Amino acid sequence: HGLNLKYALFREQYYEQSSGMHDILKSYTALLQHIEARTFTTEPLQKAQQNLNIGSQTASVYFNQLASIIEYISARLNVYMNLLLNSIFMWDYYWMYRLEKLKKTMSANLTPVLQVIADFEALASLAAFKYANPSYAVPEISTQPFEVQATELGHPLIFAKNRITNNFSMAGAGRTLVITGSNMSGKSTFLRTVGINLVLAFAGSVASARALQAFPAQIYTAMRTEDNLAESTSSFYAELKRLKMLLDITATGTPVYYFLDEILKGTNSRDRHLGAQALIRQLHQLPASGLISTHDLELGNMGDENPEYIQNYSFNSVIEGDQILFDYKLHPGICNSFNASKLMQQMGIAL
């Protein structure tokens, strides 16, 4: 009885720390039982299933035992049972000993088991995405450096009834596609469309397209950079740091697809133009290809001077009366439509 009183606080804290794991352990037990009961035909899944063997038992058995022990310890929540069981049977100490012994048995295998759970949860998410989008294409891996061939490519987060798709292609290292366009015409959304579908493809998922073929490479973006008052960093300096990271990654020889939105927008037009030109020339020498969106129409002149590695594409708009109409379709060449003045007039700015 004296021992129970002396270590009452310790036992209470031990229970509080353990009881919160009960529901998680039961959930993991059910998931592990489902994985263990399946017959897989691919080697990676078979190997993952083998990692669930801990000695002569499977991981689900041990996880279920852990949950059961916590249930037994929970009997202490009944005041009368707590008094009876701990006075006669040293209930808490017995189950605490069992729990610690089981934890020691599992400790060496716990990390691989949790990794299997994480892998299957990720794979289940990809499978669910495919199930929810049966019309999406299964991407093909290209062996031609930096090749991307897409048919009817769309943004998966835009509802199908509102989604405008585009055909898109690029190939070869050191190539830059300069995307110009009027305001709200879809430049940034298109960069996101290409980028997110490449991420889905390289993750092993389906892509929002009728067909997609792509060469595997790392994805790098510089979009929506913001200032940071805590670090005394302006939005322009934050973008420069992102661009330096891109150059550092490509300098290691890692193949990269880059997506740079409204490049160097935080500085004056002259410095923005000179900086963008210099960056494109530098990226041309590196194992990288990508898309750059900009309002700087003069940047498109680089495509005329260097057609072997720079291509111009654009999104345009049409003004009809007081309306600005967008088709959100990708067109070859530099943007030939402007709508900023009309947008300002609509906002009440007298021009």
Image (cartoon, rainbow, N blue to C red):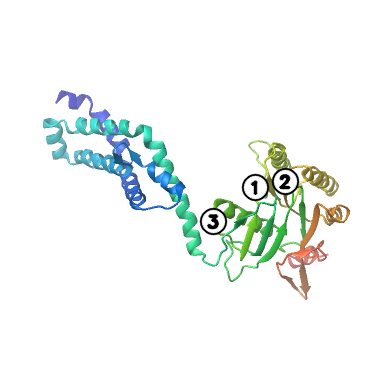
**Disc 2 element:** strand
**Residue in the image at 24% along x and 32% along y:** 96
Mark 1–mark 3 Cα distance, whole angstroms, equals: 16 Å
Name the foreground residue: 326 vs 30. Answer: 30
Which quadrant is the C terminus positioned in? bottom right
- According to the picture, the residue beneath numbered tag 2 turns out to be 288
- In the rendered image of this protein, does residue 39 appear above or below residue 232? below
- According to the picture, the residue beneath numbered tag 3 turns out to be 205
Task: Identify the amino acid type marked 1.
Answer: Ala
CB atoms at circles 2 and 3 under 8 Å apart? no
CB atoms at circles 1 and 2 under 8 Å apart? yes
Name the foreground residue: 195 vs 325. Answer: 195
Q: Position of residue 244 (x, y in %)?
A: 72, 39
**Disc 3 element:** loop
**Residue in the image at 69% along x and 48% along y:** 258
Check the image and name the residue furthest to the bottom: 321
**Disc 1 element:** loop
- Going from N to C along the chain, the mark reached first, 1 or 3, is 3
Task: Identify the amino acid type marked 2.
Answer: Ala
Q: Give the tally of numbered discs.
A: 3
Q: Position of residue 233 (x, y in %)?
A: 69, 38
Left or right: where 47 falls relative to 199? left
CB atoms at circles 1 and 3 under 8 Å apart? no
**Residue in the image at 56% along x and 60% along y:** 138
- Going from N to C along the chain, the mark reached first, 2 or 3, is 3
- Going from N to C along the chain, the mark reached first, 1 or 2, is 1
- According to the picture, the residue beneath numbered tag 1 turns out to be 217
Name the foreground residue: 181 vs 121. Answer: 121
Task: Identify the amino acid type marked 3.
Answer: Ser
Left or right: where 295 falls relative to 26? right
- In the rendered image of this protein, does residue 311 appear above or below residue 26? below
Res 17 → quadrant: top left
